Image: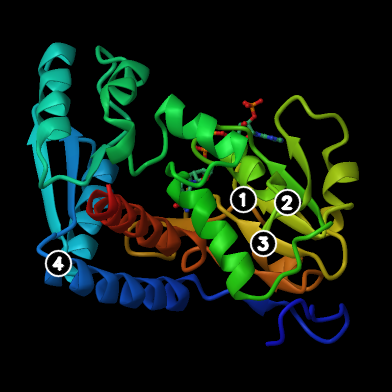
């Protein structure tokens, strides 16, 4: 596909953005970077800390460890019981901050309710905060400094847009959702000056009036609301690019598990209107881990030039 060329409405249903394929490509690039780093005596190390026994978190953490190992990195998961105190967790974070073999530290959320997530995030060395949640990295993202870390899911979305040649400059980009992990950093990335950004950004949330009036103006619609199939075809401008960040489990008696994963976008309806669309699963999800590895490699590269 030529850069900047969008498929016009009426041609056919939207083209699918292949998050699985793109994530594989990026992981290949990362493996090559890791090989170079290892040649210089540095093995990028990602340490994930999991507190408690949340089943979904255990699956995410396992996937992160596996992906980092496959890329040739040192991937370690530290599993702590749910009774771990905040002081114990902070002591572990300090230890990882001081460990030169650890380039990325990720404390898996959610934490048990007796631990304050913001206090934990603030204890992580910003230079190892590969999730991009430390206030220093949040500030750098907003300022437009590129020596911090941007959160993985929004970075993955931006990479998708550039890879598929979507013209972002001057585009109306509407983001639904204002969380600190997706919506707000997504908007901050798209509003920056430069390639893959330069968009005119609107952030919508649960208090937004007449949501459809905003979404129908969007050339690029990014949805991260956590509401199954809330964006319907009538809310989408013909030819728009639609990125569905949502991951919602809904009941489905026809599956073995009795549930099914759906996004925040009514995929079947919206794909008839949009020019490009991400499926769920297989869209944004795989990109998040790829960008986590990318941030960890970047952290390791910085230790060489520091
Ligand atoms: P949050 O619940 O933290 O935030 C949801 C946001 O959507 C809030 O800002 C909320 O507004 C807004 N919202 C909720 N309902 C509506 C509505 N009816 N109209 C307009 N705005 C609405 O969720 P996250 O940002 O953490 O995640 C969003 C989705 O993305 C979830 O499905 C999550 O599972 C998924 N996700 C996927 C990832 C991936 O790798 N693919 C990674 C991270 C998340 P308000 O602030 O007013 O409450």
Q: According to the image, label 2 marks what residue?
A: 231
Mark 1 CB near ligand 1 (8 Å cut): yes
First in residue order: circle 2 vs circle 3 = 3
Q: Residues within 10 Å of mark 4 (few under 14, many from 20)?
A: few
Residue carrying label 1: 264
Q: CA distance from mark 1 to mark 4?
A: 44 Å
Callout 4: helix, strand or loop? loop
Is any atom of residue 281 visible in this view? yes
Pick the residue in front: 301 or 188.
301
Where residue 276 sits in the image (x, y, percent)? 70, 72
Disc nearest the viewer among 3 and 4 = 4
Q: Residue at x 8, y 27 (%)?
A: 81
Q: Residues within 10 Å of mark 1 (few under 14, many from 20)?
A: many
Q: Earlier in the sequence, mark 3 or mark 1?
A: 3
Horizontal side, residue 248 vs residue 219: left or right: left
- Which residue is under mark 4? 40
């Amino acid at each position: 596909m030529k850069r900047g060329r969008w498929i016009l409405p009426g041609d056919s249903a939207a083209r699918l953005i292949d998050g699985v394929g793109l994530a594989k490509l990026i992981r290949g690039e990362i493996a090559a970077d890791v090989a170079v780093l290892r040649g210089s005596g540095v093995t990028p190390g990602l340490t994930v800390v999991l507190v408690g026994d949340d089943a979904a978190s255990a699956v995410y953490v396992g996937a992160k460890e596996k992906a980092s190992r496959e890329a040739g990195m040192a991937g370690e998961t530290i599993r702590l019981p749910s009774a771990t105190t905040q002081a114990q967790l902070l002591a572990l974070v300090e230890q990882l901050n001081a460990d030169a073999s650890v380039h990325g530290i990720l404390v898996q959320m959610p934490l048990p309710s007796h631990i304050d997530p913001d206090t934990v995030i603030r204890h992580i060395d910003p230079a190892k905060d590969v999730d991009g949640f430390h206030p220093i990295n949040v500030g750098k993202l907003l300022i437009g400094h590129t020596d911090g870390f941007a959160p993985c899911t929004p970075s993955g979305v931006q990479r998708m847009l550039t890879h598929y040649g979507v013209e972002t400059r001057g585009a109306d980009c509407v983001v639904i959702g204002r969380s600190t992990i997706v919506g707000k950093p997504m908007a901050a990335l798209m509003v920056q000056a430069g390639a893959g950004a330069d968009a005119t950004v609107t952030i919508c949330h649960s208090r937004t009036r007449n949501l459809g009036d905003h979404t129908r103006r969007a050339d690029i619609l990014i949805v991260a609301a956590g509401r199954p199939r809330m964006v319907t075809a009538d809310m989408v401008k013909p030819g728009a690019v639609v990125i569905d960040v949502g991951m919602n489990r809904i009941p489905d008696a026809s599956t073995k598990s009795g549930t099914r994963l759906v996004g925040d976008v009514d995929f079947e309806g919206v794909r008839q209107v949009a020019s490009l669309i991400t499926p769920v699963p297989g869209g944004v999800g795989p990109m998040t881990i790829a960008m986590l590895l990318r941030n960890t490699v970047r952290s390791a590269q910085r230790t060489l030039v520091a």
